[in-house]
Amino acid sequence: GNSVTQMEGPVTLSEEAFLTINCTYTATGYPSLFWYVQYPGEGLQLLLKATKADDKGSNKGFEATYRKETTSFHLEKGSVQVSDSAVYFCALSFSSGSARQLTFGSGTQLTVLP
Amino acid sequence: EPEVTQTPSHQVTQMGQEVILRCVPISNHLYFYWYRQILGQKVEFLVSFYNNEISEKSEIFDDQFSVERPDGSNFTLKIRSTKLEDSAMYFCASSEASRVLFFGEGSRLTVL
């Protein structure tokens, strides 16, 4: 079956540090890949996505590149802020069928200290 | 910006009681979903709904669960007889034909 594996947290960084959260997937075929973010007390929000190999998703200074050869979609940010403190979820989905079922990773808690 | 809204934000119930969680999806979306997140665990797919019927459901979504779109705007999840292990955050989501799901803020269910 399909699965997503994320690096385990929690991750604690100082402000302006470089962030990498690793994500790899297992799937038959070529899924779309997503990063969702969950700020404290809020729901899941789409951060960025990529729908095919070599696509780069980007938003709010975050980036992730769809790497088919390594089945990865690592999240990066060059300089994190305290406001980036949240839980980050990697996810995949397939376009076939009427449903848009997402398979999530376990989430990575990020804390950014001032 | 349009958003998915969920009520209640938190519900506490006794084991064996029925619970209905409500969601108002984004108005022009056609696909609706429920996910849940048990504390400290992954977000898990429960069910998807399209064209007034369930299109997919997971093994979690057993006979205790049902979904309904009663009036063209609400999308509800009913748990017929709650168990302790149903305690979780329940997320509603909706989407257009694209693959992007928009989630609500969640309804926290606590079963005592």
Image: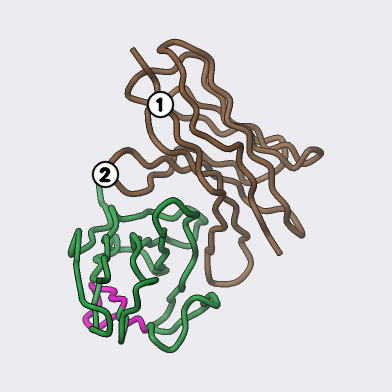
Q: Which residue is mark 2?
A: A41
Q: Residue at x 41, y 58 (%)?
A: B37
x, y percent for residue B20: 24, 77
Q: Residue at x 19, y 68 (%)?
A: B12
Separation (CA) of disc 2 from disc 1 = 15 Å
- Relative height, residue B69 to residue B31 (above, below): below
Chain drawn in green: B
Q: Secondary structure at mark 1?
A: strand
Q: Secondary structure at mark 2?
A: loop
Q: Which residue is mark 1?
A: A111
Which image quadrant is residue B24 in? Answer: bottom left
**Left or right for A112, reference B9:** right
Q: So how many labels did they put on this image?
A: 2
Give A67 or A23, whichever is nearer the viewer: A23
Chain drawn in brown: A
**Left or right for B2, reference A113:** left
Q: Which residues are magenta?
A: B66-77
Give B64 or A66, whichever is nearer the viewer: B64
